[in-house]
Amino acid sequence: MKLLSEIYYWLWLNKILFAPLSAFLIAQLTKGILASIQSKKWNLNRFFEAGGMPSSHSAMVTALATAAGLQYGWSSSLFTITAIFAIIVMYDAMGVRRAAGIHAKILNQMLEEMGRQDGKQNLKALKELIGHTPSEVVAGAILGVIMATVVF
């Protein structure tokens, strides 16, 4: 128990680490709860998967950039680097990862139709929910800013 309290204390002192980790965990918890409410059944997997509302990646990188800005100043090199990193991650979530999810959905439909023709389905379905809509990314970013502000 003492080790756990020491780890928590160390994390609390390292706010630039604590803010993004907190934002990520809260986003994942929120995502799991929202998915469970929407499906009306407990879905433990959604607490650990990518994609969905809110974007935990966006929450994490936005909290990191905000924490760097709050700690070192908005014109610091560290804020600039983390802000650019955050923009790249969020752009990727809405672009490449979202497109990959759409492609996976189409491929899964094709595989299902082909499987029905020959009576076999020997391939595992691809993950479809890996990217984000713009609103999921914005919600994650807002959560990240809020968490960094609360931590500081």
Image (spheres, grey):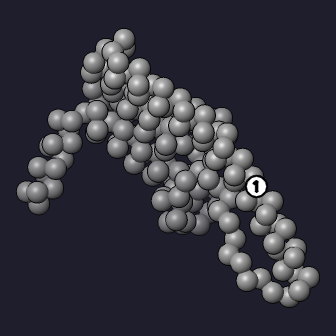
Is residue 145 in view? no
User: In the displayed structure, does residue 24 sit left or right of residue 102?
Assistant: left
Q: Nearer the viewer, residue 32 or 108?
A: 108
Q: What residue is shown at x 11% (from left), y 57% (from top)?
A: 3
User: In the displayed structure, does residue 72 sit left or right of residue 94?
Assistant: left
Return the x and y of residue 88 as percentages of the image width and height: 54, 33
Q: What residue is shown at x 36% (from left), y 38% (from top)?
A: 20
Is residue 152 in view? yes
- Residue marked by disc 1: 103
In the picture shown, does residue 104 fall above or below 67?
below
Q: Nearer the viewer, residue 10 or 90?
A: 90
Q: Dividing the picture into quarters, in which one does residue 36 lie?
A: bottom right
Figure label count: 1
In the picture shown, does residue 93 fall above or below 41?
above
For badge 1, the amino acid type reads: His
Return the x and y of residue 148 as percentages of the image width and height: 35, 30
Q: Which quadrant of the rendered structure holds the C terminus?
A: top left
> Mark 1: which secondary structure?
helix
Return the x and y of residue 115 as percentages of the image width and height: 84, 80
In the picture shown, does residue 73 fall above or below 30?
above
